[in-house]
Amino acid sequence: MQSSLQKTPLYKFHCELNARMVDFGGWLMPVQYDGILSEYHQCRESCALFDISHMGEFIFEGDLKQDGLDKILTCETSGMSLGSSRYGLMLNEKGGVIDDLIIFCISEKKFMIVVNASNIEKDFEHLRNNLSDSSLITDVSSKTAKLDLQGPLSRDVLKKIVLGTEDLEYFRFDSFDILGEEGIVSRTGYTGELGYEIFCSPKKAEVLWQKFLDDDRVKPAGLGSRDILRTEMAYSLYGNEITEDTSPLEAGLSRFICFDKEFIGRNILLQQKENGIKRKIVYFLSDSRRSPRHGQSLYASDSKEIGIVTSGIFSPSIEKGIGIGLINIDSASDGDKIFFGDEKNKMPAIFTKRPFYKKGSLKT
């Protein structure tokens, strides 16, 4: 089984650290090292290092509008300045989410697109089929490693190894000398803390990984803590909150949609805006330490099934279970009491607002 899974360039380091490895979207990835909770607190309080080299990277070269990239993405791209990045979505003709992504403006006619690991082939085909022949789209995923350095101390840690990065503003990036090789550092992340995403060659990633861990303020962290961190921030995860059968309006992502331009799936979303959506994203807090789980049912106070849990974890910051779900649009509202679980075991919870965690260092 494991032999058929893809491995990142840092696989051997994870094994040396006795990480527990799991299948994640076809990749053998570390879910934890010393422990999920300790790695969670490491990120919230100090600095955590994540190997995210399984993610996909594409380079687009061409004109945004004339070559069709602007029409593929829901976010406005034509006004992007050099060194800026934006979160957006690619939709199918039915308005479902093919993938969520971040686009980076490297130059006027050169952009990097970062996509989810499980969708690399699907996304690349979708882009290639909808871009003009005069443009160029290149999959550089196998040549690109990605490290995420996250936490309130990440700026101080990074600036000693990659000079000049301390001046980066939120959702900005630039090219830097990374151990004698040009790479990209972006002030972005998925944790709710001050942090950076570093794109470099696989060989440099091996050296960089070791250099970061030589700093006593840095510890490695796996996908287990990462899921807690992102759920506390109520960030969407592809395959959970967003799918090809889920509209971004249902998923609460309307702020990442520019209706002033044409894009694939726009007509369906306009119909949804006019007629109303049938489902909506919700956030809820358990009455106890019991945690909701992905795929469990959600129930109204009269035990009527109203939706499904898309993400659920135990929140160390709140010390209760928290969850995200999709429910029928008119079945409940903020402050209502609900239940999660199954027909035999229903646990009480209450709707709340996002995010669950509000003390992060994200924009400091």
Image: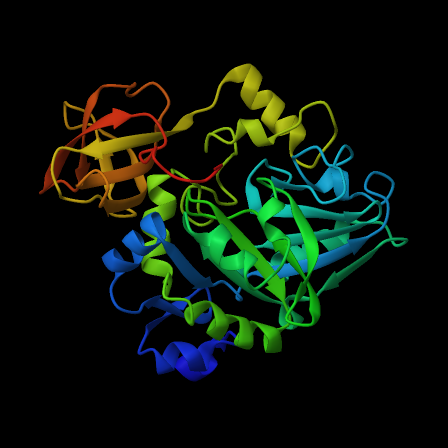
Q: Position of residue 51 (x, y in %)?
A: 47, 65
Q: Residue at x 37, y 81 (%)?
A: 15
- 148 displayed left or right of 309: right
Q: Residue at x 46, y 33 (%)?
A: 251
Q: Is residue 186 visible?
A: no
Q: Position of residue 8 (x, y in %)?
A: 51, 74
Q: Position of residue 155 (x, y in %)?
A: 50, 51
Quadrant where the N terminus is found in the figure: bottom left
Q: Return the residue found at the far left.
A: 344
Q: Residue at x 70, y 70 (%)?
A: 181
Most foreground residue, 67 or 163: 163
- 339 displayed left or right of 98: left
Mark count: 0
Q: Return the residue found at the far top.
A: 274
Q: Residue at x 25, y 39 (%)?
A: 322
- 159 displayed left or right of 263: left
Most foreground residue, 315 or 166: 166
Q: Is residue 165 above or below residue 300?
A: below
Q: Is residue 210 above or below residue 286?
A: below
